[in-house]
Image: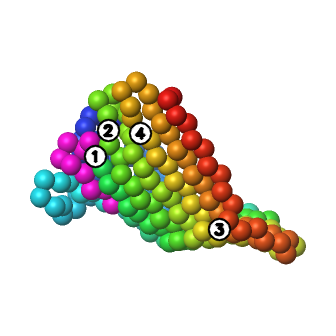
């Protein structure tokens, strides 16, 4: 039961994961090798553990002129030795998918936060995902929908008999059909769950 183990043991298990020959062959077809991502221990501060997830770049051409392209993505974890408090920070610069009728892309993706594992083995804390820009382009008319500065943040707080949760979503600007709307926000707060 890998996921019932302490977090460092889980990550070490994922680092040693090997696929079946059938799955490995399919991964080689798409990624050019059978290990599209890696999990490696990194140099850590005293009393801490550090890991890095790395997703390799992909440039895949599928059937019917479909494509998926992305550059390398990195996620760094810094945790106490028990793996109960984790700081994380990651980045993914570009991601795009297209077919003859539509192209979707995102750029400047970052994630950061801190989580702590409770006695009940649930994770509490805060984090944020930011995307500098998202674009959707339809063809053949080439209509464009663009979103800039997309942010999703969350925070969960454990109390003795309840939990509070906050989810904040913001889009700096959406532009479509010659119109533009700025500073769109959707916030939700749940208390005493």
Element at label 2: strand
Of the residues under marks 1 and 3, which one precedes in the sequence?
1
Label number found at residue 13: none
Element at label 4: strand
Q: Nearer the viewer, mark 1 or mark 3?
A: 3
Vertical order, 170 against 165 (above or below): below
Nearest the viewer among 77 and 174 is: 174
In this rendering, does residue 162 appear at all? Answer: yes
Q: Which quadrant would residue 51 be assigned to in this image?
A: bottom left
Label number found at residue 172: 3
> Marks 3 and 4, how far apart in space?
27 Å
Of the residues under marks 3 and 4, which one precedes in the sequence?
4
State left or right for residue 108 relative to residue 52.
Answer: right
State left or right for residue 52 relative to residue 62.
Answer: left
Q: What residue is rendered at 40% in x and 24% in y?
A: 161
Q: Which residue is mark 2?
A: 117
Label pair 2/1, CB-CB below 8 angstroms? yes
State left or right for residue 91 relative to residue 145.
Answer: left
> Marks 4 and 2, how far apart in space?
11 Å
């Amino acid at each position: 039961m890998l996921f019932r183990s302490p977090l460092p043991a889980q990550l070490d298990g994922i680092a040693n994961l090997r696929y079946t020959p059938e799955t490995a062959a399919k991964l080689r077809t798409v990624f050019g090798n059978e290990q599209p991502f890696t999990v490696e221990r990194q140099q850590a501060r005293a009393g801490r553990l550090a890991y890095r997830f790395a997703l390799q770049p992909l440039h895949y051409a599928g059937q019917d002129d479909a494509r998926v392209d992305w550059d390398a993505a990195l996620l760094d974890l810094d945790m106490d030795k028990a793996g109960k408090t984790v700081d994380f920070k990651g980045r993914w610069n570009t991601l795009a998918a297209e077919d003859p009728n539509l192209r979707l892309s995102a750029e400047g993706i970052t994630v950061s936060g801190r989580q702590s594992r409770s006695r009940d083995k649930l994770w509490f804390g805060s984090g944020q995902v930011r995307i500098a820009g998202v674009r959707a382009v339809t063809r053949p008319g080439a209509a464009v929908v663009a979103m800039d500065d997309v942010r999703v943040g969350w925070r969960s707080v454990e109390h003795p008999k309840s939990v509070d949760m906050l989810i904040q979503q913001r889009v700096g600007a959406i532009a479509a059909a010659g119109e533009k709307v700025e500073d769109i926000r959707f916030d939700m707060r749940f208390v005493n769950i």
